[in-house]
Image: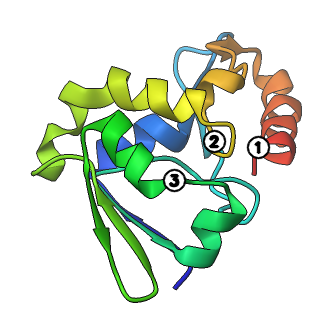
Amino acid sequence: MVYAQAGMEGEIEHRNGYVIRFSNTQGGYAHGWLGRDFHRHVPGLYWLNYFSREYAKKHSMGIAELARRTGGTATELRNGHMLRLYDSPLEWAARTDDIDDVIFETPSFFSKRRVTIPDSLQTLEVEGVTSELRRQWP
């Protein structure tokens, strides 16, 4: 295993999901995922994270430094590192701003703060915009 993460559905949605409302209909929206190509960048930080030694090196991650910056706990494993950000996965919402700051300040991580996602679009515009988002931020 090279990379793995575990978190609550809302935490994963917050880090990597997007919703664009259709502005010219009574309802409807486009939903998708960004930044999940773990070969290109680290998708994010979640309740529980595993990084192989090679993966951490490739993305210039100092796990002990990430633990310090996030208030998490780092554990050395035989082939990698485990980083737990909080005691319970239910705590993610209370720590969102702090963790988002660390992710944004760490260049090898995907951060939705680097992406311009429109709140709403005309129905005919959505396919082009979502295709471009997926191309730029797989």
Which of the two discs, 3 and 2, labels the residue nearer the N terminus? 3
Residue at 68% x, 37% y is: 107
**Count of all numbered marks drawn on residues in the image:** 3
Where residue 39 appears, as percent x and y from the top left, is: 73, 66
Residue 49 placement, left or right of 111: left
* Kind of residue sitting beneath label 3: Gly
- Kindly indicate whether the residue at mark 3 contacts the one at mark 1 (C-beta within 8 angstroms): no
Q: Amino acid at mark 1?
A: Trp
How far is mark 1 from mark 2, CA to CA?
8 Å
Q: Is residue 48 above or below residue 86?
A: below
Residue 62: which numbered mark, if any? 3
- Residue 123 lies, with reference to residue 61, above or below; the image says above
Dot 2 falls on a residue whose secondary structure is loop
Circle 2 residue: 110
The relative height of residue 24 versus residue 1 in the rendered view (above or below) is above
State which mark lies toward you, 1 or 3.
Answer: 3
Residue at 25% across / 46% down in the picture? 72
Up-down: is 1 above or below 55?
A: below
Q: Which residue is mark 1?
A: 137
Indicate which disc, 1 or 3, sits on the residue closer to the N terminus: 3
- Residue 58, horizontal then vertical, whole percent: 71, 65
